[in-house]
Amino acid sequence: MLPDLALERYKALGNSSLGGATLALTSAQYLQEIDRIRDQITYLELNVNQDFMNRFNAAKFIPHTDPTLFPSVKAWKKKAVDNPQ
Protein backbone atom coordinates (compact mmCIF):
# COMPACT_ATOMS: atom_id res chain seq x y z
CA MET A 1 0.00 0.00 0.00
CA LEU A 2 3.05 2.27 -0.27
CA PRO A 3 3.88 4.19 -3.45
CA ASP A 4 7.09 3.41 -5.30
CA LEU A 5 9.21 6.21 -3.84
CA ALA A 6 12.82 6.32 -2.71
CA LEU A 7 13.23 5.19 0.91
CA GLU A 8 14.64 8.63 1.76
CA ARG A 9 11.18 10.11 1.08
CA TYR A 10 9.61 8.17 3.97
CA LYS A 11 9.71 9.35 7.56
CA ALA A 12 8.62 7.26 10.53
CA LEU A 13 6.16 9.15 12.70
CA GLY A 14 6.25 6.93 15.76
CA ASN A 15 3.21 7.02 18.01
CA SER A 16 1.43 9.87 16.23
CA SER A 17 -1.99 8.84 17.53
CA LEU A 18 -0.86 9.49 21.10
CA GLY A 19 0.46 12.92 20.12
CA GLY A 20 -2.81 13.76 18.37
CA ALA A 21 -4.88 12.61 21.33
CA THR A 22 -2.76 14.75 23.67
CA LEU A 23 -3.26 17.82 21.49
CA ALA A 24 -7.01 17.21 21.28
CA LEU A 25 -7.31 16.92 25.06
CA THR A 26 -5.15 19.92 25.92
CA SER A 27 -5.97 22.50 23.24
CA ALA A 28 -9.33 24.01 22.33
CA GLN A 29 -7.76 25.24 19.06
CA TYR A 30 -6.84 21.70 17.98
CA LEU A 31 -10.22 20.37 19.10
CA GLN A 32 -11.90 22.91 16.77
CA GLU A 33 -9.56 21.86 13.97
CA ILE A 34 -10.50 18.22 14.55
CA ASP A 35 -14.19 19.11 14.30
CA ARG A 36 -13.57 21.06 11.07
CA ILE A 37 -11.70 18.15 9.48
CA ARG A 38 -14.30 15.63 10.69
CA ASP A 39 -17.07 17.62 9.02
CA GLN A 40 -15.25 17.41 5.66
CA ILE A 41 -14.77 13.64 5.66
CA THR A 42 -16.67 11.61 3.06
CA TYR A 43 -17.14 7.88 3.54
CA LEU A 44 -16.70 5.74 0.43
CA GLU A 45 -17.63 2.06 0.29
CA LEU A 46 -14.73 0.86 -1.88
CA ASN A 47 -15.77 -2.77 -2.09
CA VAL A 48 -18.74 -1.83 -4.30
CA ASN A 49 -16.44 -0.15 -6.85
CA GLN A 50 -15.49 -2.98 -9.22
CA ASP A 51 -12.58 -1.10 -10.82
CA PHE A 52 -11.06 -0.41 -7.39
CA MET A 53 -11.50 -4.03 -6.31
CA ASN A 54 -9.85 -5.31 -9.49
CA ARG A 55 -6.86 -3.02 -8.97
CA PHE A 56 -6.69 -3.79 -5.25
CA ASN A 57 -6.71 -7.55 -5.79
CA ALA A 58 -4.11 -7.30 -8.57
CA ALA A 59 -1.86 -5.20 -6.31
CA LYS A 60 -1.76 -7.93 -3.63
CA PHE A 61 0.35 -10.21 -5.80
CA ILE A 62 4.08 -10.29 -5.12
CA PRO A 63 5.62 -9.71 -7.54
CA HIS A 64 2.99 -7.28 -8.79
CA THR A 65 1.19 -8.24 -12.00
CA ASP A 66 2.43 -5.01 -13.62
CA PRO A 67 6.11 -4.49 -12.69
CA THR A 68 6.27 -1.24 -14.68
CA LEU A 69 4.38 0.40 -11.80
CA PHE A 70 7.34 -0.29 -9.49
CA PRO A 71 10.57 0.62 -11.31
CA SER A 72 12.63 0.73 -8.12
CA VAL A 73 11.85 -2.94 -7.39
CA LYS A 74 13.50 -3.91 -10.66
CA ALA A 75 16.52 -1.74 -9.79
CA TRP A 76 16.76 -3.29 -6.32
CA LYS A 77 16.42 -6.81 -7.71
CA LYS A 78 19.13 -6.15 -10.31
CA LYS A 79 21.42 -4.70 -7.61
CA ALA A 80 20.85 -7.76 -5.39
CA VAL A 81 21.70 -10.12 -8.27
CA ASP A 82 24.80 -8.12 -9.25
CA ASN A 83 26.07 -7.85 -5.66
CA PRO A 84 25.06 -10.98 -3.70
CA GLN A 85 26.09 -10.99 -0.05
Image (tube, rainbow, N blue to C red):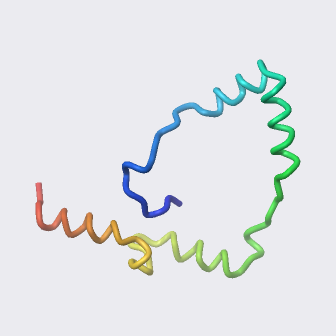
Using the rendered view, name the quadrant where residue 28 is placed. top right
Q: Residue at x 45, y 48 (%)?
A: 10
Using the rendered view, name the quadrant where residue 35 is placed. top right
Q: In this view, does 52 lie to the left or right of 10?
A: right
Vertical placement of residue 26 versus 36, above or below: above
- Marks counted in the figure total 0
**Residue 68, image x, y percentages:** 40, 79
**Residue 25, image x, y percentages:** 78, 21
Quadrant, the C terminus: bottom left
Q: Is residue 21 left or right of residue 82?
A: right
Vertical placement of residue 31 versus 72, above or below: above
Q: Which residue is drawn at 60% across and 33% down?
A: 16
Q: Which of 71 and 80 is in front in this view?
A: 71
Q: Is residue 1 left or right of residue 32?
A: left
Q: Which residue is drawn at 44% across and 80% down?
A: 65
**Residue 51, image x, y percentages:** 67, 81
**Residue 20, image x, y percentages:** 69, 30
Of all residues, the one furthest to the front in this rendering is: 29
Q: Nearer the viewer, residue 33 or 59?
A: 33
Vertical placement of residue 35 versus 42, above or below: above
Vertical placement of residue 23 versus 39, above or below: above
